[in-house]
Amino acid sequence: MNINLKLLSTFLAVAEKESFAKAATATNRSLPAVSMQIKQLEDQLGVAVFQRTTRKVVLTAEGEDLLISVRRAMAELDAGLARVQQASDIQIGRLSIACIPTIAGTRLPAVLTAFAAAFPGITVQVRELVVQALLESVRKREVDCAIGPVLDDCADLEFSPLFEDPYCALLPASYAHDGKDTITLAQVIRCGPLLKFSNATAFRDHIDSVIEASGVTVRNSYEFVQASTLIAMAEAGLGVALLPRIAIPRTTSLPMRLIKPKLKRTIAIISVRGHRPSPAAGHFIRMCHERIPPSASELPVR
């Protein structure tokens, strides 16, 4: 059967008005057009849905059954269209994002607070993931978008840069201030054991490749998953923490230096290339660009 919505809406109008003429007026169609559409519907069904008399139009038994189904279907359709419209207007819906931990604990809170105030009907789910798991969640469409570092060899993904995040060393409290705001990796290694992220992070991969290329030998080091753990260990005097600048809190009293030559990562919104974001995701991405500073340079070097 090829029964379209127009035939069913015409049938509903005739059934409710109990008149072809009144249905034609209500639907702004001509009487012949209404009659033709009802005939087309009956021909496709193989049964009559109306009994015509000189006084009025009455539903047949088959027409009564059809009316129940059409009303139910129209109600479902109206409700579905209303939900789509509400989602388009950002009144209801869901937003799922993935974010690397160092950004989730620093830049993301202000953005999500502003987003919640602007769109209180949107349910937000945040997944804190290391880079490889984050990229997979984007590729599998498990999240609407993600916030993480720009990486090479990801042609299927689109990276929209947010800000640059330089690499820093969090040094022992006993470090003698030399008046400079930078330090080389060789100098860092001479300051004590290295405190590094586990090898599940893109930051760690980058640091390791630079150390290997520089020819500097690392004699001992410790690995941790969370930035807060690295900082706590550095503050306890265990060693020198290598961190992205964004992860270093203002409250720490330890000396901080930028790595020289300059090492950095670019943090971006990550999405599937060519994929159009949902209305909620589109507004979230816009707010990230508006509210996240373009660099981490406002953090003081001590």
Image: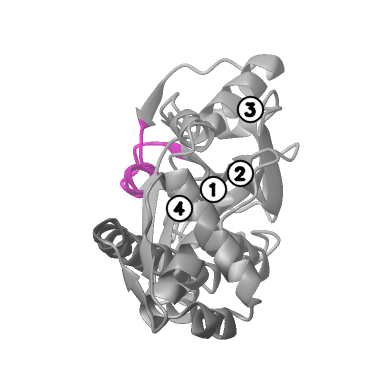
- Left or right of residue 70, residue 24 in this image: right
Give the amino acid at mark 4: Glu
Give the amino acid at mark 1: Cys
Q: Residue 122 appears at what percent x and percent y?
A: 40, 68
Give the amino acid at mark 2: Ile
Mark 2 burial class by Cα count in 10 Å: few <14, some 14-19, many 20+: many
State the image quarter where residue 210 is shown: top right
Which of marks 1 and 4 precedes in the sequence? 4
Residue 227 got which mark?
none
Which secondary structure, mark 2?
A: strand
- Left or right of residue 181, residue 238 in this image: left
Give me the C-alpha separation between circle 3 and circle 1: 38 Å
Give me the C-alpha separation between circle 4 and circle 2: 53 Å
The magenta span reads 224-240
**Identity of the residue drawn at 31% across and 61% down:** 63
Q: Is residue 9 visible?
A: yes
- Cβ–Cβ under 8 Å for marks 3 and 2: no
**Between 48 and 133, which is closer to the camera in this rendering?**
48
**Magenta span contains residue 289:** no
Which of marks 3 and 4 precedes in the sequence? 4
Location of mark 4 (residue): 42
Location of mark 2 (residue): 270
Q: Residue 74 appears at what percent x and percent y?
A: 39, 65
**Between 162 and 44, which is closer to the camera in this rendering?**
44
Location of mark 3 (residue): 186
**Magenta span contains residue 225:** yes
